[in-house]
Every structure is written in C-alpha cells, then in structure tokens.
Image: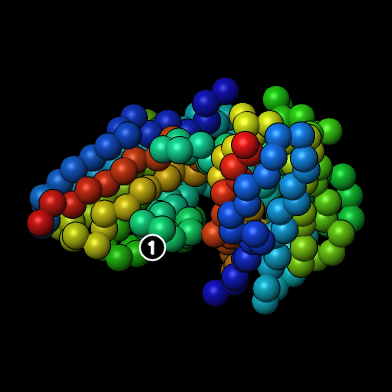
C-alpha cells in the first residue's frame, strides 16, 4: 500500500517566490515523517523531521493529522534550493519514501 | 555527521555473474542498515533491512536468494546480486540508522551504479 504520496513530479518556481512541495501519507498509527533532499550528484540527506519542529535552510513542514499531510514550505525560494525532494515516513524499523518532487528555481 | 560509504561506486558485470556491494559506516556503529534500489527518475524502493548478526528482512517481491545480504559486523553490510541479469541494472543505495537525540536518523551512502551487460 502506498504510504507516502508526492503528487508533483516536477515543480518550477521563480527565485524569491514561495514554494510548497506536497506530501500526503497513509498510516494508522502516529507517524514519524521526514523530508530528504538530494542535490545534483550528491547523496540523499536529511532536511528536516516533524518531530523536531525545526526550520532548515528556510524550509518548514507541519504535520497535519487531519489532512494526513506534511507539506514542505519555504517563503522565498533560492536558486540553490533546486534539487530532488523526498518525503518519507518511518514505520517501525523502516523508512518508506515518496516518489519525489524535482524542484527547479528559475533565476 | 555520520558518514556511510559504498564500494564500488560503479560496476559493470556480465550477465550470469555475481556482484558484491559493500556498505560501511565509517565513524559509528550501525546495528541496522537498509538497502534501497533506485531506477532512473524514480524514488528509492526499500529492498531489505539488514540487522547485525541476524538474517535480513526482505520486502515483499524482493528475491532473497537473488539479493543476498550479510551484516557481519556493526560497520559493514554487503549486498550480493547473484546471477545478475540486465534487468538488475540499477542504482543501489544503502543507509545506516543511528539514534540521534530524541529520534533515529538515517545516513545514506553515495550509491552504487550496477550495469549488467
């Protein structure tokens, strides 16, 4: 069963514009959700996790249990934000990744 | 931060041969490592969970006799693709789980590109 859904494969925004990458999940318990980022030719790395309620590189994500969503947001996109973003859910001992959204920030 | 390495980074092999990929945690011990497969422009697909000193747990649809996983020490897990075929060509990524503060974190290796001719 699809646990994590990222509806947008590609997303382009202009520099300075707000950006939102969508993530919806299906999970019966209390989920632990994460956003991972993969810059060009680099390995996957953790961006943020909902349990920490942190803001990393200007990005935030709020867990909405009613809507089962964990959208990633940034008010002003920068060119260096161009990358592949994966939403992930931890279930027990395992991580499950969404299909990813490729973000392009246009100068 | 924690570093995970993979070796080799790129390998070409002939159909029918076996290939071993190593995943190492360089500066920490990992009781649990994960193996993923990633097709071009697609997401990571979890193949199996590797636990030190015990048998790996495979995801549904992953052939355990074809993808042999060994986690002999707290810093090394290996994935052996046996009798490789062209359809096994893919990007294989490992990760290691470590407890960081209040939650677990995963650190990913750089991946191994396997091409089977």
Q: Residue at x 78, y 43 (%)?
A: B18
Q: Quadrant of the N terminus of chain A?
A: top right
Residue at mark 1: A54
In the foreground, B91 or A16: B91
Q: Quadrant of the C terminus of chain A?
A: bottom left
Q: Residue at x 36, y 56 (%)?
A: A40
Is residue A87 at least partly visible in the picture? Answer: yes
Left or right: where does residue B30 sit relative to residue B4?
right
Q: Chain of mark 1?
A: A
On the image, the x and y values in percent for residue B37 come to 59, 41
In the foreground, A20 or B58: B58
Left or right: where does residue A86 sit relative to residue B94?
left
Left or right: where does residue A17 sit relative to residue B60?
left
Above or below, comparing residue B6 to residue B40 in the picture? below
In the foreground, B28 or B89: B89
On the image, the x and y values in percent for residue A29 come to 59, 35
On the image, the x and y values in percent for residue B2 come to 59, 71
How packed mark 1 is, by other alpha carbons closer than 10 Å (few <14, some 14-19, many 20 or more), is some
On the image, the x and y values in percent for residue A51 come to 49, 55
């Amino acid at each position: 069963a699809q646990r994590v859904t990222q509806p947008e494969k590609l997303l382009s925004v202009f520099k300075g514009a707000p950006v939102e990458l969508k993530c919806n999940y299906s999970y019966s318990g209390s989920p632990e959700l994460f956003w991972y980022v993969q810059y060009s030719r680099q390995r996957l790395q953790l961006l943020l996790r909902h349990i920490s309620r942190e803001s990393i590189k200007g990005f935030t994500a709020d867990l909405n249990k009613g809507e089962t969503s964990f959208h990633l947001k940034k008010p002003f996109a920068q060119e260096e934000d161009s990358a592949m973003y994966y939403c992930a859910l931890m279930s027990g001992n395992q991580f499950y990744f969404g299909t990813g959204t490729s973000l392009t920030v246009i100068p | 931060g924690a570093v995970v390495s993979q070796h080799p980074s790129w390998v070409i092999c002939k159909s029918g041969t076996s290939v071993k990929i190593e995943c190492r945690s360089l500066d920490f011990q990992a009781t649990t490592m994960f193996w993923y497969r990633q097709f071009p422009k697609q997401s990571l697909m979890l193949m199996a969970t590797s636990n030190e000193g015990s048998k790996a747990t495979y995801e549904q649809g992953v052939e355990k006799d074809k993808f042999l996983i060994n986690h002999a020490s707290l810093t090394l897990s290996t994935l052996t693709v046996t009798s490789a075929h062209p359809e096994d060509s893919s990007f294989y990524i490992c990760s290691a789980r470590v407890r960081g503060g209040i939650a677990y974190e995963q650190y990913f290796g750089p991946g191994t590109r396997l091409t089977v001719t």
